[in-house]
Structures are given as structure tokens and as C-alpha cells.
Image: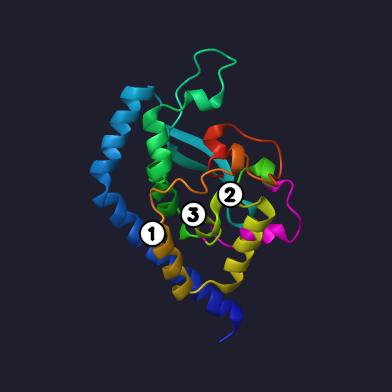
Amino acid sequence: MSAAVSRGRDSARRRVVDVVVAGGAGTVLSPVLGLIAVLVRLRMGPPVLFRQRRTGRDGREFAIVKFRTMRAPLHPSEPDAARVPPLGRMLRATSLDELPQLWNVLRGEMSLIGPRPTLPEQVAGYSTRQHRRHEIRPGLTGWAQVNGRNAISWPERIELDIWYSEHRSLRLDLAIVARTLAGWGRREGITGEGGVNPGFPGPSPSADADRDP
């Protein structure tokens, strides 16, 4: 069997798992999703969802979906940090704001496991090698996520993502899932020291994007 055929079959199997798990999780978690949507609407107003362009597999852009974690500014110069209410901080700390991305998985724009999708303006600064992280679908969690997340530099994160794309296997995926669940709810790695992600490739976005691009 050629390597290309083997990769194709592996991709097809992963897609089946993505659809089954994301669909099942969305069904089971529908009461939680509904409750969060109501709370966001009541505490922060419309819209409930936050959408942003990200770069996915083969460099194709798509709209990532999250629950909003920031309210509208009270005045033009209000800092982003002041716009995150307690509900927003809780959603970020528990990563519950990421749950709507199950829809991105069902649409085939994302996978359960893979590199986190980044902003197009960040991708514009990638080297030829760094673009290799786009050879697979971006994921809800990934190897870089469980090895430091935003607390490590961007070049390190990208190298971890490339390593994963070259070595991914069922065993590695299960290890990533286990480490993701073990670290669920912890605030470590949400941002780098002082709220800055070191080695950031490109202009700094707003806090909603900068938390976990």
C-alpha cells in the first residue's frame, strides 16, 4: 500500500470519528450549550456567538465559532481586559467558550485533534516550513495545547504542531485527549507572562482572539 493511500484512509477514518464524536458530544451537551447561550445573552447582550476568520487545512480560511466572552465597550478607549465580565472569565478558564466549535468539526473545517487555527495575519508571517502545520485540519485541542499552550513562544508552538502532523497516531491522540482532560479548567497557559504570547507572528489582535488563536 502506498503512503498516499495509507494517509487517505487514515484521514477518512479520522473524519468518521470526528463526525460521530462531535455529533454525540453536541447532543449530550445541548442543555449546557443552551444554558451558556442564555447566560451570555442576559449578561453581555447580543450576539451570543463570536465569529472570526481563521486559517485551516491547506491554507483555506473559515469562520471559527465561540461563545462571546467580552461585552461591548462602554467607551472607545476602554481596555479589552475591562470588558471581560466574570462569566467571560469563567468560560475562558474552563474553555467552555470553545464548545460551539463542535459545529466547525461537523462542517469539516476542524478536527477534534490538530493544530489550533490561527489568524490569517499571523499566517502571513509564516516561513515555508511553518506552513506545514496547515497540512492537516486544525483541532479543538492539540500537541502544542497540552505542552504549554500560549505560555510558550509561537515558534515553539508551531514546531510542536509540525511534529504532531508528522507523528500522529491513535496512541498519540489518546495521550492528547487524556492530557487535555487532566488540564481542563486550569488557567495555566491561557496567555503568556504578562498576557503576551512571546514571538507573536504579526499584529496583536483583541483579547478575544489573543486568548487562544
Q: Which residue is mark 3?
A: 110
Q: Which residues, given as a range, are shown in magenta?
A: 123-142
Quarter holding the N terminus is bottom right
Q: What residue did someone put label 1 on?
A: 182
Q: In the rendering, at what x and y percent does residue 125 appear? A: 74, 47
Residue name at image x 35 percent, y 29 percent: 40
Q: Earlier in the sequence, mark 2 or mark 1?
A: 2
Image quadrant in which you'd find residue 76: top right
Q: Amino acid at mark 1?
A: Ala
User: How many numbered marks are there?
Assistant: 3
Q: Which mark is residue 169?
A: none
Q: Is residue 7 left or right of residue 180?
A: right
User: Magenta span has 207?
Assistant: no
Under mark 3, the amino acid is Met
Q: Is residue 45 above or below residue 197?
A: above
Relative image position of residue 91 (x, y in whole percent): 39, 38
Kindly identify which numbered label has been placed on residue 151.
Answer: 2
The residue tagged with tag 1: helix, strand or loop?
Answer: helix
Work out whether residue 209 or residue 154 is closer to the camera in this orientation and state it: 154
Q: Element at badge 3?
A: loop
Identify the residue at image location x=30%, y=29%.
Answer: 39
Q: Is residue 102 left or right of residue 74?
A: left
Mark 2 secondary-structure assignment: helix
Crowding at label 2, few (<14), some or many (≥20) Cα neighbours within 10 Å?
many
Furthest residue toward top: 75
What kind of residue is marked 2? Ala
State whether residue 52 is above or below residue 72.
Answer: below
Single out the residue that lies furthest toward the bottom: 1
